[in-house]
Image: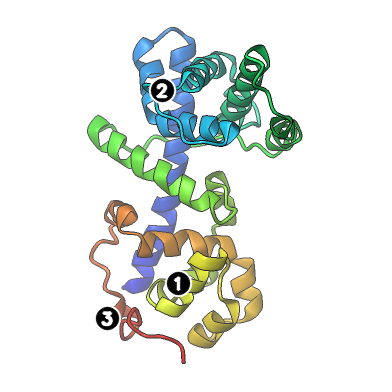
Amino acid sequence: MPTQKFVLLSINIMGLIKLFLFNLNTLITSAQKGDPLSREKLIKKHYHFIAKICSKVCKRYLIWENDDELSIGLLAFNEAIDAFDTAGDVKFSTFAGVVIKRRLIDYFRHQAKFEKEVLSSTFEEKNELKTGINAKSINLYNDDQTKENLVGIITYYQDLLVGYGIDIGQLPEVSPKHRDTRENLLQAAIVLSRNLDMLDYLQKYGQVPVKLLCASTGLSRKIIERGRKYIIAITLIFSDPILSPLKRFTNFDGYQGEKDYGEDQSNYRVV
């Protein structure tokens, strides 16, 4: 039954996200206790994150082999690992980002390269720390290789969600508790992911095309607006090839939209 697959998708995706957050805290705790392999894994998983923060602060593209700023960022990241409170309410990425920014600012001051624009980050950092969300989770599987691959995909998914103003840690909270609501929003996500006009709108404006989606699904504006984050999160999984392994993980790989919800709308434009 399609509805049973939807329930599996909803429940297991949320579990996988929780797993990602849980494993992160586990690695941090191990690294703080002196495990070099855990620290190495954390650094490896966050290479892109460190470079992204450093490049944003420096306002230019940085290269690991050439730019001292990345070395400063890496040292700051190590410092963040040691100082992070896994039992607190702040996300590690938020905390590490703040530490990296501050260490780079100190470095720029020392090098007489500090610019006024960087000071504006101080206010942002305070807000970031206030809105941080602590990870809670479960451990679902033990295959290290599979875990590495899935963590990489979830990290990509996390970055993708940020572009839509969605924190991956919020997904378990915004997941509908009632089965009927969950199935309706999943149906909306399928329709959205298979319609070029609506998908283009989502990618261009970062917003759900509420009016078009209401007309296509028969759902009320209120339901779609309330489920906006959930719809976007599931739509990304359906529409981004990189995220396709998440469907396999949730026993959703065999799903064919044209069979369960009528004709495939991916080649249709709204006239």
Instruction: Name the quadrant containing residue 112.
Output: top right
Secondary structure beneath dot 1 equals helix
Residue receiving disc 1: 199
Residue 82's place in the image compared with 60, above or below, is above
Distance from Cα at disc 2 to Cα at disc 3: 44 Å
Secondary structure beneath dot 2 equals helix
Q: Are marks 2 and 1 in contact (CB under 8 Å)?
A: no
Instruction: Name the quadrant containing residue 91.
Output: top right
Task: Residue lying at the far top in this picture: please name it.
Answer: 34
Decide which of 67, 177 is in the foreground and name it: 67
Instruction: Name the quadrant containing residue 140.
Output: top left
Locate the N terminus by quadrant.
bottom left
In percent of width and height, residue 225 lies at 63, 70
Residue plotted at (37% across, 85% down): 268
Mark before the other along the chain sequence, 2 or 3: 2
Name the amino acid type tagged 3.
Lys
Q: Is residue 16 visible?
A: no
In percent of width and height, residue 260 lies at 31, 79
Distance from Cα at disc 1 to Cα at disc 3: 20 Å
Residue 102's place in the image compared with 127, above or below, is above
* Marker disc for residue 259: 3
* Marker disc for residue 43: 2
Secondary structure beneath dot 3 equals helix
